[in-house]
Image (tube, rainbow, N blue to C red):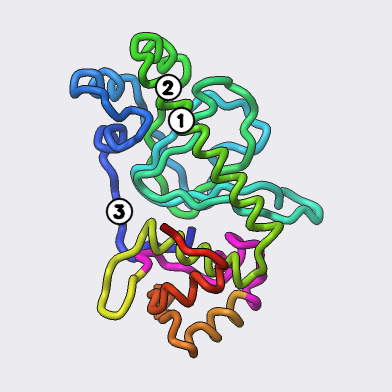
Amino acid sequence: MLSNMALVRVVDGRALLERIPVFAGLNRRELDLLYAITGTRRLRTREVLFRKGDEGATLYGVMRGRLRIFSGGSGGEAKEVIFKFLEPGEVFGEIALLDSQPRSATVAAVEAVELLTLQRRDFIPFLEQHPKVAIQLATALAQRLRSLSDAMEDAMLLSISGRLAKKLLTLAQAHGKPVPGGTRIDLKLPQHELGELVGATRESVNKHMRVWTEAGVLRAERGIITVLDEEALEAYAGYALF
């Protein structure tokens, strides 16, 4: 997630709703009705939005700032495991709109954050009037489950170099910008945060990044990484992204 983005991004709340796959197909009037029942919430840097085990009943959309989703690290010798960083335009907490069960992970702000909020008590009546949204919501949840399953498989089967290569390829797909000679990932990626994302130490990440930089696979400048040889990274990851 990745400490500071290269550019500050702000997403308008209504535009965010319109981009959410769950609400694809709603007409302008329906989107206006949905937007009318949303709210906003602001968090300070490092402020916790909710903790694992807290009751959940809200969907959130990131309009400004970045957050991290993680588990553990609350005390004693528990190790913190980061599942994902959330950027402007991303949505989380969909499951809470359906079951109001305890949160499965902790979410905290990496920097100052502004969120769009949608409460379950307001969303259910809307859902009853728009059953197509219920089908799309189920599809989105299935995709989220598949993503978590893939992450667990990576942790068990891939080496550190494989996990790191795959993560860089994924980030290049999601946040890449074509530049002469390669694809620049438009996020600042401190090595300790890359390590947290792939379950490795900063020292291990530094070693692999140095080797790949010397081999011409990557270029790293002030935390901004440019992928110069995608095929080489795919070889390290053990697969090709399509």
**Residue 89 within the magenta-colored segment of the rendering:** no
Label 3 is placed on what type of residue? Arg
How far from the left and from the top, in percent, is residue 234? 49, 70
**Residue closer to the observer: 127 or 64:** 127
- Residue at 51%, 32% in the rendered image: 141
Tell me: residue 241, above or below residue 74.
Answer: below
Q: Quadrant of residue 48?
A: top right
Find out whether the residues at labels 1 and 2 contact each other: C-beta distance under 8 Å. Answer: yes
Residue labelled with disc 1: 139
- Residue at 42%, 39% in the rendered image: 91
Neighbor class of circle 2 (other Cα within 10 Å; few <14, some 14-19, many 20+) is: few
Tell me: residue 101, above or below residue 158.
Answer: above
**Residue closer to the observer: 186 or 6:** 186
How far from the left and from the top, in percent, is residue 181? 30, 80
Label 1 is placed on what type of residue? Thr
Q: CA distance from mark 2 to mark 3?
A: 30 Å
Q: Which mark is residue 135?
A: 2
- Residue at 26%, 23% in the rendered image: 26
Please give the range of residues in magenta: 185-204
Q: Quadrant of residue 123?
A: top left
